[in-house]
Amino acid sequence: MCFSAAGSFGMSGVLAVVGTTSLARSAGRPQHMFAAVPFIFAAQQAAEGVVWLTMDGGADATLHHAAVNAFLGIALVAWPIWLPISLRRIEKDSLRRRALTGLCWLGGAVSATALFLLLRWQPTATVTGHSIRYDYAGSTNAVQSFINLAAYVTASVGPFFVSTARMTRTIGLTFAASLVIVYTVQRDVLVSVWCFFAAVLSGLILLAVADVQPQAASSQVA
């Protein structure tokens, strides 16, 4: 999956359907931001589909650079801030909400740093094997790459272990395992190959969102 333009666009379509279903089944407005996660995955994969189609550059060079920036913008800028905020919105425990607030601030710092680096140094994309390798500021320095990854994981994965929402720990463990597996097996193309796990995570989010609705309905009856 996601090893070609067709794979990326196909995955984008599947994730858009999952996102539509997830939003339709969400229990209320506070949950909408979390339920919309599959939609963002869909946009991310659509952007990579365009990267594949314009890889040769030429007349499509401007579109290619825009697609690379869109893909990395979602992957590196959107996720670290979107995930902690979306989970904070549905958190009911006051202490957990304060912890999630701290992770929101961390995510904001990670996102702001990533945005600055992407705007300051033009990222590039090259085909490596059957995947796309993205090079951007800090990605070629081993120490800097590890520090960036640690901050990214803390901001993006940490909220799932703080939240008391249903299935968040299962989603968090899957998220963390996917990053470790891809980082170990195909470190150079981590950002691209990880799309396979986006489908799994989106499915789990749909299950979590759908599972809340019966709970909310039963509480209203009671």
Image (cartoon, rainbow, N blue to C red):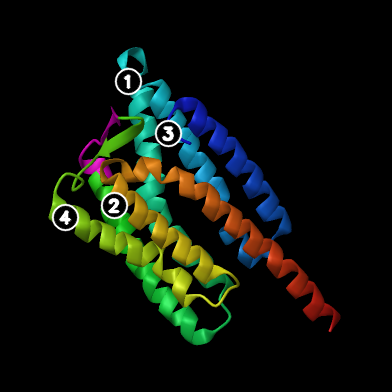
Q: Are marks 3 and 2 in contact (CB under 8 Å)?
A: no
Label 3, label 2: how far apart the Cα atoms are: 22 Å
Q: Which badge, 4 or 1, is on the more N-terminal residue? A: 1
Numbered label attached to residue 131: none
Numbered label attached to residue 61: 1
The residue sitting at 85% across, 79% down in the picture is: 221
Q: Residue furthest top?
A: 59
Q: Which badge, 3 or 2, is on the more N-terminal residue? A: 3
Q: Which residue is mark 3?
A: 48
Numbered label attached to residue 184: 2
Q: Residue furthest front?
A: 185
Mark 1 belongs to which amino acid? Ala
Per the image, is 207 magenta? no
Q: Which residues are magenta?
A: 118-128
Q: Which residue is mark 4?
A: 144
Q: Which badge, 3 or 4, is on the more N-terminal residue? A: 3
Mark 4 belongs to which amino acid? Gln
Total numbered labels: 4
In the rendered image, residue 183, in percent from the top left (x then y), is placed at 30, 51
**Label 4: few (<14), some (14–19) or many (≥20) C-alpha neighbours in 10 Å:** few
In the rendered image, residue 197, in percent from the top left (x then y), is placed at 47, 49
Decide: is 219 above or below 109. Answer: below
